[in-house]
Every structure is written in C-alpha cells, then in structure tokens.
Image (cartoon, grey):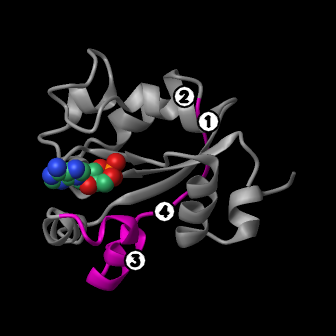
C-alpha cells in the first residue's frame, strides 16, 4: 500500500454515540480524504485476529469484548504522510494524556474506550487495510 494511506476505525463507543460524522469531519478538516469505508460488527474471532499483536496483554479479553460490543467503522484514509499525520490528529491512547483538540481528547471515554484506532506503521496500515477491504477498494483507480 502506498505511504499516503492509513487505516482508521471509529470504534463502537464513538460509533454507538453517533459521533462518526463529527469524527470524519475532524479528519477531513485535517486534510484526510476517504478512500473506502464500511460499517461492520466484528465477531470475537475477527476482533481477536485484528488485535493479534495484543493477545498476551492483560487487557486483551476486555478489548475484544469492547470491539465486539457494537458496530464500528473501518476507513482507509489518504493524505501525505498519512500514518504519522493521523496519529498526531487522534492523540495519545489514553484521552487524559491526549493533547487538546485531538480526536481522543474530544471524544474518548477511557484508555480502552478511546473512540478511534489508527495504524502505527506503513506495514501495519497495509495489513489492517487488507483485513477489511480488497486491494481494488484500497487502491482504487491509481
Ligand atoms: P488502539 O490504538 O486501537 O490499540 C490497541 C487498543 O487496546 C487501544 O487502542 C485501546 O483501545 C486498548 N488498550 C490499550 N492499552 C490499554 C490498557 N492499558 N487498558 C485497556 N485497554 C487498552
């Protein structure tokens, strides 16, 4: 996947509170454009596979329960320097540590129920985009 793309997920806490529109507007105002998006309700197997890297962490079971608690919205976003730019815009994992004006500071409830996910590297962005979307959806008419 080209380095101008990254994967975000509007998580079940934010999606369920009707915050998808506000969060997407925030991301568009920051220069991101939507490449492809959908709404999905993950199964336990799917959530576990997506967060495979955290399987041994103490919060894994709780994270899977949260991510399967309702629909969420995976989105492939485009922008120059997409991965780093999105992580700046969403802020720290824990909203209490996130800078003012970031998505998590504005909309997250807790370190777990933190409103939004963002890929942490170009490699993981490609892996995570492929988890939800086909190549033709991610890359489009390039
Ligand atoms: P995310 O950026 O999607 O990556 C892993 C997720 O696990 C993280 O956001 C939080 O939702 C959750 N998470 C990370 N650390 C903790 C923690 N210490 N306690 C509970 N949940 C966490």
The residue under label 2 is 85
Residue 3 spot, x, y in % from top left: 72, 42
Instruction: Please state the extent of the stretch shown in magenta in the rendering.
Output: 32-57
Q: Is residue 52 left or right of residue 125?
A: left
Residues at marks 2 and 1, CA–CA distance in whole angstroms: 5 Å
The residue under label 3 is 49
Q: Residue at x 26, y 33 (%)?
A: 104
| Of the image marks 4 and 3, the number of the one nearer the N terminus | 4
The answer to whether the residues at label 4 and label 3 have Cβ atoms under 8 Å apart is no
Q: Which mark is residue 106?
A: none
The answer to whether the residues at label 2 and label 1 have Cβ atoms under 8 Å apart is yes
Residue furthest to the right: 142
Q: Nearer the viewer, residue 18 or 92?
A: 92
Dot 2 falls on a residue whose secondary structure is helix
The residue under label 4 is 38
* Quadrant (top left, top right, bottom left, bottom right) of the N terminus: bottom right
Q: Is residue 125 left or right of residue 100?
A: right
Residue 4 spot, x, y in % from top left: 71, 39
The residue under label 1 is 82
| Of the image marks 1 and 4, the number of the one nearer the N terminus | 4
Residue furthest to the front: 56
Q: Is mark 3 within 8 Å of ligand 1?
A: no
Dot 1 falls on a residue whose secondary structure is helix
Q: Nearer the viewer, residue 126 or 134?
A: 126
Dot 3 falls on a residue whose secondary structure is helix
Specify whether residue 103 is in view: yes
The answer to whether the residues at label 1 and label 3 have Cβ atoms under 8 Å apart is no
Residues at marks 4 and 3, CA–CA distance in whole angstroms: 18 Å
Quick one: label 3, few (<14), some, or many (20+) residues within 10 Å?
A: some
| Of the image marks 2 and 4, the number of the one nearer the N terminus | 4
């Amino acid at each position: 996947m080209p380095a101008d793309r990254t994967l975000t997920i509007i998580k079940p806490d934010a999606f369920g509170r009707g915050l998808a529109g506000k969060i997407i507007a925030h991301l568009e105002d920051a220069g991101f454009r939507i490449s492809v998006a959908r709404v999905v309700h993950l199964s336990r197997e799917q959530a576990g596979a997506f967060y495979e890297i955290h399987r041994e962490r103490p919060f894994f079971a709780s994270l899977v329960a949260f991510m399967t608690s309702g629909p969420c919205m995976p989105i492939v976003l485009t922008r120059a320097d997409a991965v780093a730019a999105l992580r700046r815009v969403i802020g720290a994992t824990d909203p209490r540590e996130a800078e003012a004006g970031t998505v998590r500071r504005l909309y997250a409830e807790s370190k777990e129920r933190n409103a939004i996910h963002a890929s942490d590297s170009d490699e993981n962005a490609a892996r995570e985009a492929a988890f939800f979307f086909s190549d033709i959806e991610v890359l489009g008419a390039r």
